[in-house]
Image (cartoon, grey):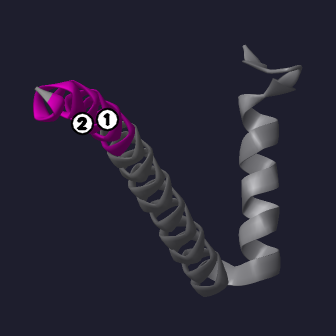
């Protein structure tokens, strides 16, 4: 049982070596930096989706305004 041929004990040994090399403080800072970057990326994607939806709404609104202008012009000639 493992991940691509790597067993649980091998993962534990790799984890211990990484902690010994970098230390828990650096790993904690790295984790918080990575989490902040992911949070910023998610909020940017959410903002971009909101802008796309607003742009679609504006396009629909402009089209309906054009239709109403076209229908109003013939009425003005009568």
Q: Quadrant of residue 49?
A: top left
Residue 71 within the segment the image draws in magenta? yes
Question: Left of 16 or right of it: where is 54?
Answer: left
Name the residue nearer the viewer: 41 or 22.
Answer: 41
Q: Residue farthest to the top?
A: 1
Q: Residue farthest to the right?
A: 5
Name the residue nearer the viewer: 14 or 57.
Answer: 57
Q: Residue farthest to the front?
A: 78
- Give the x, y percent position of residue 74: 21, 25
Give me the residue at 30% from left, 39% from top: 57
User: Mark 2 sits on what residue?
Assistant: 69
| Circle 2/circle 1 CB separation < 8 Å | yes
Mark 2 neighbour density, 10 Å: few (under 14) some (14–19) many (20 or more):
few
- Give the x, y percent position of residue 34: 59, 68
Name the residue nearer the viewer: 16 or 39.
Answer: 39
The C terminus is located in which quarter?
Answer: top left
Label ID, residue 66:
1
Magenta highlight range = 58-77
User: Which type of secondary structure does the marked residue at label 2 adopt?
Assistant: helix
Image: 66 above or below 4: below
Residue 17 within the segment the image draws in magenta? no
Q: Quadrant of residue 53?
A: top left
Mark 1 neighbour density, 10 Å: few (under 14) some (14–19) many (20 or more):
few
- Give the x, y percent position of residue 20: 77, 75
Q: How far apart are marks 2 and 1 (CA)?
A: 5 Å
The N terminus is located in which quarter?
Answer: top right
Image: 34 above or below 70: below
Give me the residue at 82% from left, 77% from top: 21
User: Which type of secondary structure does the marked residue at label 1 adopt?
Assistant: helix
């Amino acid at each position: 049982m493992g991940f691509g041929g790597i067993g649980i004990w091998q993962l534990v040994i790799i984890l211990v070596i990484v902690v010994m090399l970098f230390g828990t403080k650096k790993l904690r800072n790295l984790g918080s930096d990575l989490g902040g970057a992911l949070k910023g990326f998610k909020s940017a994607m959410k903002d971009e989706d909101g802008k796309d939806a607003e742009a679609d709404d504006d396009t629909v609104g402009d089209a309906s305004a054009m239709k109403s202008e076209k229908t109003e012009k013939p009425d003005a000639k009568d």
